[in-house]
Image (cartoon, grey):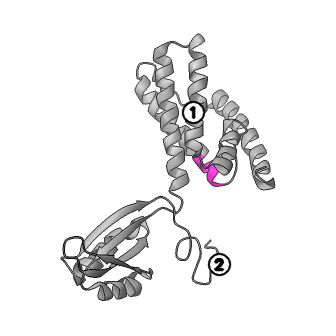
Amino acid sequence: MLGRTTFIYTLIGTFSFSLWYALIAKYSTLVIDLTDDMVLASLFAGLFIGVGLGIIFNNGGTTGGVDIIARLVQRYFGWSIGKTFLIFDFFVIVLSLTYLDIREAMYTLLAVYIGARVIDSMQEGTYAGKAAMIISDHRTAIADGIHATMNRGTTRLLAKGGYSNRELEVLYVVVGRNEVNRLKTIVKQIDPHAFVTFHHVYEVGGEGFTFDENRMPLK
């Protein structure tokens, strides 16, 4: 249902997880006693789980557990993988109250929540960016500066001022997160009084991000 590649990566992920878990448990000499600091233990448990599973998911694999269900739910229902993990593990923790005390269950739930958030952050951040909307009387010069300096395209949106009732154009541009300061500099140099808003974009696809100018996938 998820394809041949995912099937193969799932086999690799399942056996690798079991192998490395056994080797590290048996031969690792690193011991960090966090018995008296369950908050720190929960934070790092969630962080390590989230990063590890995030890497696996970003490469199209699973570890053969609930993550298979999470991938299927994501494909057919659009839920995030982290959300599915959180729901399933919540019910597992509730059932585990037969042998866990409420304090241990709460710490475990904290670790699961952090892991789910890290997974979603890694999934959403693969091609994340920032969208900017720029209102300025010097929009043509700003657009030319963005095209020439940043090699990014812009879109002009027709708008109307709510107070002035004046017809105007709004520049819309999407840039990488590391390009925000360059964009701010260009706008400020051309029009220090420009009205600019920035919005977080969870995923960007297309030319300049996932495809080049010839519409070929970026490597």
User: Is 90 included in the stretch rendered in magenta?
Assistant: no
Residue 99 visible in this rendered orientation of the protein:
no
Look at mark 2 in the image and give the residue it sits on: 216
Q: Amino acid at mark 2?
A: Met
Residue 180 located left or right of residue 161 = right
User: Residue at left 27%, top 78%?
Assistant: 187
- Classify 34 as above or below 47: above
Look at mark 1 in the image and give the residue it sits on: 87
Residue 19 located left or right of residue 109 = right
- Examine the residues drawn in magenta and state their main secondary structure: helix
User: Residue at left 30%, top 88%?
Assistant: 141
- Classify 94 as above or below 115: above
Q: Earlier in the sequence, mark 2 or mark 1?
A: 1
User: Badge 2: few (under 14), some or many (20 or more) residues near its Cα, within 10 Å?
Assistant: few
Q: Nearer the viewer, residue 99 or 195?
A: 195
Please report the bounds of the magenta region as a residue range.
Answer: 54-59
Q: Nearer the viewer, residue 13 or 122?
A: 122
Labels 2, 1: front one? 1
User: Residue at left 53%, top 40%?
Assistant: 116
Residue 140 located left or right of residue 4 = left
Q: What is the CA distance from the residue labelled 2 to the residue labelled 1?
A: 38 Å
